[in-house]
Each structure stands twice: as structure tokens, then as C-alpha cells.
Image (cartoon, rainbow, N blue to C red):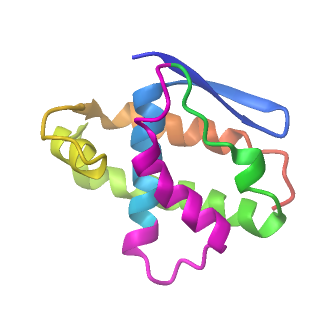
Amino acid sequence: MAHSIVEFRGRFVRLHDLDIVAAALLLAEVLRRDATMQAPTKLRRNVLSWETRFDEWGPGCVDLDLDSVLSDDVSIACFRTLLARAGTLLPAFGDIVPSDFLSSRLGLSNGSVGPLPTHLVQSALEQLGELFSDTSA
């Protein structure tokens, strides 16, 4: 699989497409599991839509469109919280995010995607978080 560039306010990280996909799936999982998570509607809608949009993006063209999705301090702060909470889901998987988790969230038959080492997903979450190291939120 290819690599894509994820940008936010002129900063960027280059990540393996599958690592971005897995990180985004975990962000959506946090929103579904945590009823106390008060994400702005635009952020919630976009994060949840990523699960169904991956087939629209070709290799090397994964675009989370963070500049549009994170347009204010509230959404930025919420996204940073989502990233942190997504990371707390990884230990339950052990060393590998199983293929059935990835495939089922993407609406694919089991075994279509993955498995993926959890350390790669953790690294992707951390690198995405680095995009916000200079933001006030």
C-alpha cells in the first residue's frame, strides 16, 4: 500500500495508508463507544464518514481534510482528545490489530485488510498528534 500526506495548517506527516485507515477507524470507534464524548457535529460526521470513504481514495490519496474539519479551537481540542483516547484502545488488541476488526469496520470480508501491528497504529496516532503541537487548543 502507498503512503499519503496528512496536512494541517501547513504542517504535514507522511504515513502509510493502512496506518491512517487504522487510526481513523479507532477515532470512529471512540466516538461510538464513548457517549460522553461531545464532539462538534462537523467533526463527528467527518470522522464517522472516513470508514466509508477509504474506497473512494486511491493509493497515496488518503485525505482527511483536517484544515476543513478542524476549523476552530473546540474541534481541534476535541480531535486531540480523540487521538489520545484512540491510543487507549490499542492495548486490548495486544501486539496486532486483527484483520476482522479492520475489515469489518470497512465493510469488507474478513481477511481483506490486515492484520496490522499495533505499534504502527500507535505511531500513526502520535504523528497525527504532532500536527497540533503548536496549536493553542
Q: Position of residue 65 (x, y in %)?
A: 68, 43
Towards the viewer: 137 or 63: 63
Q: Quadrant of the N terminus?
A: top left
Which residue: 77% across, 70% down?
74
Q: Is residue 132 visible?
A: no
Residue 41 in magenta?
Answer: yes
Q: Quadrant of the C terminus?
A: bottom right
Q: Which residues are magenta?
A: 31-59
> Would you say 35 lies left or right of 94 here?
right
Q: Position of residue 37 (x, y in %)?
A: 53, 77
Towards the viewer: 92 or 116: 116
Residue 69, above or below 60: below
Residue sticking out furthest to the left: 110
> Would you say 127 lies left or right of 21 here?
right
**Residue 72 found in image quarter:** bottom right
Which residue: 43% across, 76% down?
34
**Residue 43 found in image quarter:** bottom right
> Would you say 17 lies left or right of 81 here?
left
Towards the viewer: 122 or 52: 52
Which residue: 76% across, 50% down?
68
> Would you say 101 lies left or right of 81 here?
left
